[in-house]
Amino acid sequence: MKPSPARRIANIGAWVILLVLIIPSLVSIPVSVTSKTYLSLPWEGVSLQHFRNLFTSAEWLSSFWQSFVIALAASALATLIGTLAAIGLWRLSGRFTETLRAFLLLPLMVPPIISAMAFYRWWVPLGLIDSYLGIILAHTILAIPMVLITVSAALANFDLRLEQASRSLGAPLATTVRRVILPVIRPGILAGAVFAFILSWDEIVVTLFISKFDVFTLPRRLWNGMRENTDPTVAAAAVVLISITLVALAAFTLLSKKRREDEA
């Protein structure tokens, strides 16, 4: 059966939008192999010196490591809190729960600059400015809505008869959640964890406000590289990030496909 003209137009439009979003980021690939010491296309020769500088620079490697640790910790906390919140809101019903859900989703609706100023205002008296704990907590708060959305979507398709059967057999609530609910909604939890990790890994606005010298994440290093000296190492770092993202997405897709095949 051939797709309708409207569907063809929608597919073409989707591909055009996708290309418009992706093509600008691909410019970093030729720029990363330029032989110049500033951002430019490799018209006069190709060189891997900027990749060599990226993987031998203590500053760049430190920023990679700091971003990874912060994103890993923030995504773990956000996944735990967001999953528990989604299950709690799913089991309860009423005006209060919807108000609480809207409150938990506020970080998605508030502009990043407003969030950054709010974190700075509260983190200063708590002594959390320019600390790993301060940035991890800020990124966790920003990432919780991502987990809440994906886990709530997974719970929307949960068969309540499974929970009822577990409770009727005498299983306590904690056991039902651990042995029945969590395995069924695992794809939603994993998706939320991935989104939370990416959000923390890429976050720059809040980080610029609450970090100074001791914590220097990768987005902040990229920002400084673009703002101060237009170092092509920035493009090399972008290429590495794009490659890591593509590998992670491919691995996640393959694992999801394999899990669906095993369930079938």
Image (spheres, grey):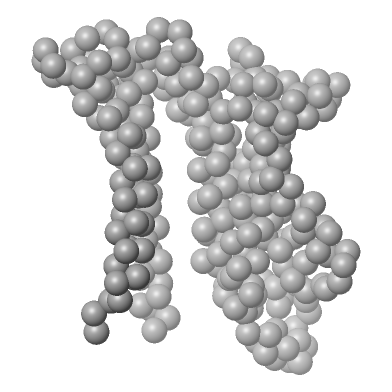
Please tell me which residue is depicted at 57% across the width and 38% down the height of the picture: 200
Q: Is residue 89 above or below residue 244?
A: below
Seen at 57% across and 56% down, the residue is 192
Q: Could you say which quadrant of the image residue 45 lies in?
A: top left
Q: Residue at x 64, y 14 (%)?
A: 212
Q: Quadrant of residue 34?
A: top left
**Quadrant in which residue 256 is drawn:** bottom left
User: For the view shown, which residue lies furthest in the front direction?
Assistant: 5
For this rendering, which residue is in front, 245 or 22? 22
Q: Considering depth in this image, is 198 or 5 the residue closer to the camera?
A: 5
- Horizontal arrangement in the rendering, residue 246 relative to residue 129 (left or right): left
Residue 223 at least partly seen: yes
Q: Is 220 placed left or right of 231 in the picture?
A: right
In the rendered image, residue 10, in percent from the top left (x then y), is placed at 36, 63
Where residue 128 appears, as percent x and y from the top left, is 76, 24
Q: Is residue 133 visible?
A: no
Badge count: 0
In the picture as drawn, the residue positioned furthest to the left comes out as 45
In this picture, is 250 found above or below 209? Answer: below
Q: What residue is drawn where x is 25% and y is 15%? A: 40
Q: Is residue 163 left or right of residue 243?
A: right
Quadrant containing the C terminus is: bottom left
Residue 211 on image: x %, y %: 65, 20
Q: Is residue 34 above or below residue 68?
A: above
Quarter containing the N terminus: bottom left
